Amino acid sequence: MRMSLRNTIRRTADLRREVIEREAILYGPLLEDVMFLRRRGFILHAEGKRVRLGNRLVSRSTLHDIAARERRLIRNARGDR
């Protein structure tokens, strides 16, 4: 039983690592923005050179702008400047 749990945990960690590696290839330098927006509840995935954000197909630069805006909104809500 104990060994099975260890194997399950190890396999889960391996799968997470594989997903992160795949997404790093898909999103490149935007990976941090993608992960941030997903944590904020946005649904997004790559479609060729563009990214589907909810029901909108946006350019990668627009995605970066949206993530920057969300970060500003969070800072302003907390009172940080």
Image (cartoon, grey):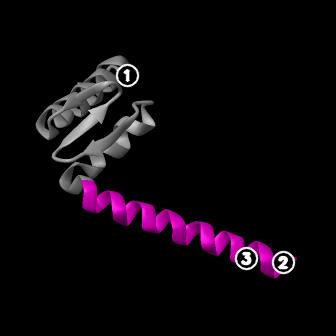
Magenta stretch contains residue 24: yes
- The residue where tag 1 is placed is 78
Q: Amino acid at mark 3?
A: Arg
Q: Earlier in the sequence, mark 1 or mark 3?
A: 3
Find residue 44 and report its image quarter.
top left
Residue at the image point whose x is 34% and y is 57% from the top: 23
Residue 6 is marked as 3
Find residue 73 and report its image quarter.
top left
Q: Amino acid at mark 1?
A: Arg
Callout 1: SS: helix
- The residue where tag 2 is placed is 2
Pointer 2: residues within 10 angstroms few (<14), some, or many (20+)?
few
Residue at the image point whose x is 79% and y is 81% from the top: 3
Q: Amino acid at mark 2?
A: Arg
Image quarter of the C terminus:
top left
> Mark 1 and mark 3: span between their CA atoms?
41 Å
Q: Position of residue 9 (x, y in %)?
A: 67, 70
